Image (tube, helix red, strand yellow):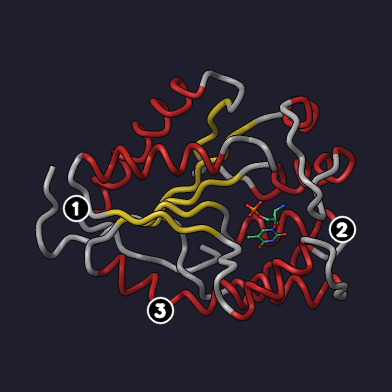
């Protein structure tokens, strides 16, 4: 399964409610692909390591207050500041497993009542994922898993609204995996869809931009 030198990597995005298991699954997927000898990196948004990311982190921790529109634009800026590196990595053949992307941006902000088209606008021109995997769990089940932290948004009533927003963003190209299955079963299904899409990217699937 060695990629040929001129084939590109795939942009794989994992989405879902808080506590759906995205972070553990992206870690497991990364480890598997890496061990199989693929060139792969694990990314996440928000990327809290940048200056913008630190502002976001402080907002999420309730250490600062921001207008809903302003924080939305910061989340988007946090993706824009990584865009050129993302393109470089993909073109050089590295597959990126990304934990949250523009869909989180739109789903969480529109759940607060912001206009969905307004929310989508600053994402225009970012790289479009080659695959979006939605780890599907009801807000109630996710809440039962416990471990909602003290961060903003980690509340059942709000997560119900986020679930509704995700539903209106989903299209037929998304792969939906039942996140209430065992960790191993979710992992297995995830590997299948990801390997399949990596193959189509290696074979020359063109890169595109949001919103396709
Ligand atoms: N979030 C994440 C947004 O509201 N907009 C975005 O654009 C992104 C990428 O940040 N509750 C929210 C969703 C999460 C929170 O993410 C922190 P994580 O994956 O828990 O670090």
Measured in 3D between alpha carbons, the distance from the residue under mark 1 to the one under mark 2, in whole angstroms, is 41 Å
Q: Which residue is mark 1?
A: 203
Of tags 1 and 2, the one toward the viewer is 2
Q: State which tag comes first along the sequence, 1 or 2.
A: 2
Q: Classify residue 121 by image quadrant.
A: bottom right
Element carrying mark 1: loop
- Badge 3 or badge 1: first in the primary sequence: 3
Residue indicated by mark 3: 84
- The correct choice, above or below, for 132 with respect to 89 in the image is above
Residue at 56% across / 76% down in the picture?
50
Considering the image in quadrants, where does the N terminus appear?
A: top left
Q: Which of the labelled discs sits on residue 112, or is there none?
A: 2
Label 2 Cα crowd, 10 Å radius (few <14 / some 14-19 / many 20+): some
Query: For this rendering, which residue is in front, 19 or 114?
Result: 19
Q: Measure how far apart labels 3 and 1 are at the Cα level.
A: 22 Å
Give the mark nearer the N terminus: 2 vs 3.
Answer: 3
Using the image, determine if residue 97 lies above or below residue 82. Answer: above
Q: Residue at x 41, y 27 (%)?
A: 189
Q: Where residue 26 sits: x, y (%)?
A: 46, 43
Classify residue 87 by image quadrant. Answer: bottom left
């Amino acid at each position: 399964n060695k990629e040929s030198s001129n084939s590109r990597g795939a942009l794989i995005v994992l989405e879902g409610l808080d506590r759906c298991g995205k972070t553990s699954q992206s870690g497991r997927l990364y480890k598997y692909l890496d061990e199989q000898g693929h060139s792969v990196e694990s990314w996440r948004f928000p990327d809290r390591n940048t200056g913008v990311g630190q502002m976001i982190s402080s907002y999420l921790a309730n250490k600062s207050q921001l207008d809903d529109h302003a924080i939305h634009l910061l989340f988007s800026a946090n993706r824009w500041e990584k865009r050129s590196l993302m393109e470089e990595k993909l073109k050089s053949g590295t597959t990126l497993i990304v934990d949250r992307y523009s869909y989180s941006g739109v789903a969480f902000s529109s759940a607060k009542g912001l206009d969905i088209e307004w929310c989508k606008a600053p994402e225009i021109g970012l790289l479009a994922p080659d695959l979006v995997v939605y780890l599907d769990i009801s807000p109630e089940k996710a809440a039962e898993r416990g471990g909602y932290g003290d961060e903003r948004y980690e509340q059942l009533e709000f997560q119900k609204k986020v679930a509704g927003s995700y539903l209106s963003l989903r299209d037929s190209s998304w792969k939906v995996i039942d996140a209430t299955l065992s960790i191993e079963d979710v992992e297995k299904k995830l590997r299948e869809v990801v390997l399949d899409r990596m193959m189509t990217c290696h074979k020359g699937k063109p890169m595109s931009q949001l919103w396709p």
